[in-house]
């Protein structure tokens, strides 16, 4: 009888554990939007069209970024529409690419801002920092060696500062909001040199 009670208790704990794990995973998964990143996809389409000097395709790809550009304008007061339309109208490939670099920088800032507001939720903060790194990888080749190294160190510092829940409490480290803020600002300062 006792053994049957332990088996039932174990079964209940297992079901509870799986339910908690799946709800946490699905939350992190949905927050990650584990598929398309419109700015990354749009940037790739724009660069491909620029290489072919096809400004009709450039305009089409830019039009596909309307939601993202609108969000940045409303929420972050960053107007990418005006310089992008001027660059496309002038068929200035370098300026079009520069505006897309600015869009990538703003996406990094947006993700870091979100992570900073969610430091109490490790999974969400980690997803947002990892997304920042995904965007960062697109522009680091354009940085000089010193700035590239500074950016790499800053993104690593940002990731470390979100803490770690550990495994069953082992290796647990709390988030360090001050370090996160400092490392994020270092990264933003470095990547902002691209559009100065």
Image (tube, rainbow, N blue to C red):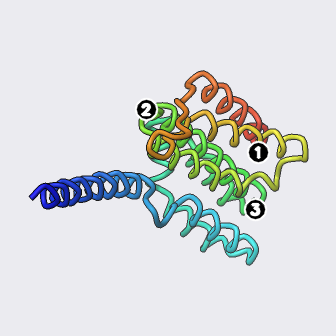
Position of 172 with respect to 97 (left or right) is left
Confirm or deny contact between disc 3 and disc 2 (CB under 8 A). no
Task: Give residue 145's position: percent from left, percent from top.
Answer: 90, 47
Residue at the outermost right position: 145
The residue at the point 45 percent across, 36 percent down is: 75
Dot 1 falls on a residue whose secondary structure is: helix
Dot 2 falls on a residue whose secondary structure is: loop
Residue at the outermost left position: 1
Query: Which residue does the numbered mark 2 point to in the structure image?
Result: 120
Q: Quadrant of the N terminus?
A: bottom left
Query: Which residue does the numbered mark 3 point to in the structure image?
Result: 93
Dot 3 falls on a residue whose secondary structure is: helix
Figure quadrant of residue 43: bottom right
Mark 3 or mark 2: which is in front? 2
User: Is 169 or 26 nearer to us in this picture?
Assistant: 169
Task: Give residue 35's position: percent from left, percent from top.
Answer: 47, 66
Query: Which residue does the numbered mark 1 point to in the structure image?
Result: 152
User: Is 27 or 111 nearer to us in this picture?
Assistant: 27
Position of 125 with respect to 42 (left or right) is left
Figure quadrant of residue 176: top right
For marks 1 and 2, give the CA distance: 24 Å
10 Å crowding of disc 3: few (<14), some (14-19), many (20+)? some
Q: Earlier in the sequence, mark 1 or mark 2?
A: 2
31 up-or-down from 177: above or below: below
User: Is 13 or 186 nearer to us in this picture?
Assistant: 13
Q: How many marks?
A: 3
Residue at the outermost bottom position: 52
The residue at the point 44 percent across, 35 percent down is: 118
Residue at the outermost top position: 178
178 up-or-down from 4: above or below: above
């Amino acid at each position: 009888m006792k053994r049957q009670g332990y088996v039932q208790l174990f079964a209940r704990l297992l079901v509870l554990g799986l339910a908690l794990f799946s709800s946490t995973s699905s939350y992190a998964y949905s927050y990650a939007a584990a598929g398309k990143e419109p700015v990354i996809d749009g940037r790739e389409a724009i660069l491909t069209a620029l290489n072919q000097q096809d400004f009709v395709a450039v305009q089409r790809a830019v039009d596909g970024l309307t939601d993202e550009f609108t969000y940045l304008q409303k929420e972050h007061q960053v107007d990418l529409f005006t310089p992008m339309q001027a660059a496309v109208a002038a068929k200035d490939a370098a300026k079009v690419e520069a505006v897309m670099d600015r869009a990538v920088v703003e996406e990094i800032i947006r993700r870091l801002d979100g992570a900073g507001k969610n430091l109490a939720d490790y999974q969400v903060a980690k997803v947002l920092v990892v997304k920042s790194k995904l965007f960062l990888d697109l522009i680091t080749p354009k940085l000089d060696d010193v700035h590239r190294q500074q950016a790499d160190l800053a993104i690593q510092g940002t990731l470390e500062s979100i803490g770690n829940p550990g495994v069953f409490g082992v290796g647990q480290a709390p988030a360090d909001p001050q370090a996160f803020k400092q490392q994020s600002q270092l990264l933003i300062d470095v990547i902002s040199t691209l559009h100065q």
